[in-house]
Image (tube, rainbow, N blue to C red):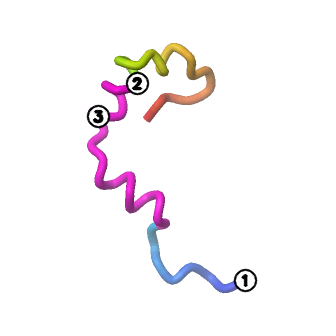
Amino acid sequence: MKPAKYKYTLLRQVMSNIPAYLGTSLATKLGIDRQARTFSPY
């Protein structure tokens, strides 16, 4: 297996374009934050 060419993965690049407040506000609005047990919705 070859080492990665780039420092950031595709998921990290996509997540860097989404503001942090958007994820937490949507989780609160939809009630997902109450369902998560082991990690935060963001």
The residue carrying mark 2 is 27
Q: Position of residue 27 (x, y in %)?
A: 40, 24
Disc nearer the start of the sequence (1/2): 1
Classed neighbour count for the residue bearing mark 2: other residues with Cα under 10 Å, few (<14), some (14–19), many (≥20) = some
Secondary-structure class at tag 2:
helix
Give how far apart the Cα atoms at labels 1 and 2 are.
37 Å
Residue 19 is one of the magenta-drawn residues: yes
Q: Which residues are magenta?
A: 9-26
Amino acid bearing label 3: Leu
Disc nearer the start of the sequence (3/2): 3
Q: Is residue 4 above or below residue 21?
A: below
Q: Is residue 27 above or below residue 34?
A: below
Instruction: Point out which mark residue 1 bears.
Output: 1
The single residue placed furthest to the front in the displayed view is 30
Amino acid bearing label 1: Met
The residue carrying mark 3 is 22
Q: Quadrant of residue 36?
A: top right
> In percent of the image, x 46 and y 73: which residue is there?
7
Q: How many marks?
A: 3
Give how far apart the Cα atoms at labels 3 and 2 are.
9 Å
Answer with left or right where residue 27 lies relative to residue 32. left
Secondary-structure class at tag 1:
loop
Judged by its main secondary structure, the magenta piece is helix
Q: Is residue 39 above or below residue 20?
A: above
For marks 1 and 2, give the one nearer the viewer: 2
